[in-house]
Each structure stands twice: as C-alpha cells, then as structure tokens.
Amino acid sequence: MKTLSFIKQASFKNPHPQEDFFLISQKYPIFVVADGVSLNFDKDSDYPKKSGAGEVAKIFCEVVIREAEKKYDNFSEKNLEEIFDIGNKAVLEYNVSRGVTKSTINYWNADLFSATTAFLLIKDGDAYWWSLCDSGVLMFDKKGRKIFSSPAGWVTFERNKPENWDSMSEKQKIGTLHKDYRNGLGRKGEPMGYGVVDGEETARFYLNTGVLDAGTDNLIFVYTDGFENYFNLDQFIDIFKLWPSDLSTKLEDFISEKSKTDPKKYGSEKTLIAITN
C-alpha cells in the first residue's frame, strides 16, 4: 500500500493560523483529517495567533487514531460511530477547559471550537469510512473514473435555511447558522442543518459512514474542503494514476500554479491523504 499526505497553508493572504490537521497510524492503514472551523471576527479585530479550532482538529485526530488502533483487530462498521463519539467527547472536554460553553458564547468571536472530519480504515480489503460536513472521502478507479464520493455536507441546510436568508447581513447569517443549524435537529429529531465536531452529542446525527470494497489499484482520497475543486480537474487525477517517484514534487508544483491562477478557488488551506494498493 502506498500513501501520500499533504497539508498546505493558504497561499493567499490569510489572517488565520493553521487549522487543518491529519494523522496516519504507524501500525495500521488508518487515516484521519480534520479542518478546524475558523471563528468570525469583525474586520478591525485581531485573530488569535493560536487557534482553538486548530487545537480541536489536532486533539480529535489523535484520539481517533488511538481508539481505532485499539479496535483494529476486530473492527466492524459499528465501531465508526463509537470512535467518533469518543473523539467528539474529547473536543467537549477541551471546549469546557477553555471556558467555551453554550452559556459563554455569542456565536461570532466567542464560539464553540469545532472541526469537520473525514476518516478511512482499511482491513481485509474493506474500506471503512466516515465524513462530516465538507471534509470527505473519494475513490477513483485505475482509469481515473470517480466510483465513490461521500455525501455533500450542506445539502440538508440548503433545504431548510430561512426564507429571509439572502437579506441577512453576514453577521446575522453566521449567528443564525451557528445557533440554530449547527448540529441542529428538528421537532421530530431529524437533522435540519449541518454537522461538525464540537462536543455536542447531536453531531452524530450528521455523521456519514459506510464500508467500501477497497479494490485493486483504486485511488482513495481523504481530504479537507480546500481540495474540493481540484478533484474536478483531470490533470490533477492524472498525477496520481501512475504514482511516479516524484509525486510529491509534481503535486506541489501543480497546486502552486493553480493557486496563483485562481487563489480563491484553489488557494485555501487544504489537506490530502492519497492511498492506493
């Protein structure tokens, strides 16, 4: 099995510290990424030099890898949610330790530290995965054709967003989004918004999980949302098809060029783990 991992800070002006994190098990084929959700500040406010969201991403990945390694020998699909819950509780503990609770936040510059995540564990030819919000898992066959994509993270919110959404100010949108729709459930307990790891138990209702046939010569990506637009580029997938010895260099050069060409579309912070057998 061959793997390549890549994390890159935003290549255009970005006031935030690094908030992506990833880990790969040193014992087993287990992979996890997390993308800390940036806090929102007024334009004249200074963003913290050390991000609580970045710390949450790190803590979550560390706990997930540790727990997945414990369960690897007898791993089954039900373990996905169990491990996620343990990681989510670790994030709750961190938020509480920082004095960040529902009674102390304003859903703007004082808010729950949170992250999106994607996970992959391969055992006996099966690929166990999860995705949450806009971090995800993709699989391509050896010809570069997409054969699996984890569900999009914002579909439920788009169906349920307020009728006056377009007339809201940015601050109103963010406040409403975080207060009413983040890990939010409807009257019948149904998901109505979007999910993130932030310590809330309702996050589990937004977790997408499943088991894939890892196949032979398939290419699997575990990624954060900064890479989403790259997967639509045939040239990007072509880089991985033959898995050349200088893959890292080719990838770096391609990303650098695309980021310069269209920084808003291709230049945001991003993390990628690529796996093939």
Image: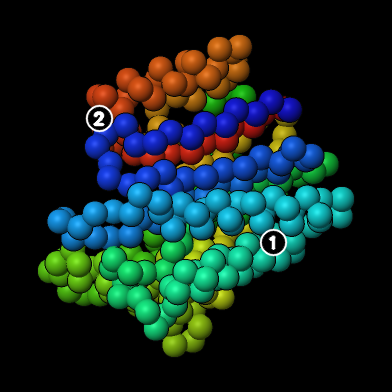
Percent from the top left, x then y, of residue 34? Answer: 52, 50
Q: Which mark is residue 152?
A: none
Identify residue for label 2.
262
Q: Nearer the viewer, residue 258 or 212?
A: 258
Q: Is residue 2 visible?
A: yes
Residue drawn at x 46%, y 62% is 114
- Picture quadrant where residue 138 is located: top right
Q: Residue at x 66, y 40 (%)?
A: 24
Question: Of residues 50 and 122, which is closer to you in this image?
Answer: 50
- 264, above or below 158, in the image: above
What amino acid is found at the position of numbered circle 1 in the picture? Ile
| Rendered view: 45 above or below 174 | above
Which residue type carries mark 2? Asp
Question: In front: mark 1 or mark 2?
Answer: 1
Q: From the top left corner, tell me how far across and down residue 251 is, in percent.
A: 47, 21
Q: Would residue 9 appear left or right of 212 to someone viewing this image? A: left
Q: What percent of the width, then of the height, locates residue 119? A: 62, 49
Residue name at image x 31 percent, y 28 percent: 259
Residue sitting at 60 percent across and 28 percent down?
4
Q: Secondary structure at mark 1?
A: helix
Name the residue tied to disc 1. 83
For the N terminus, which image quadrant?
Answer: top right
Task: Give the distance between the C-alpha atoms of the residues marked 1 and 2, in whole angstroms.
Answer: 38 Å
Viewer-proximal residue, 87 or 123?
A: 87
Q: Is residue 228 visible in this depiction of the protein?
A: no
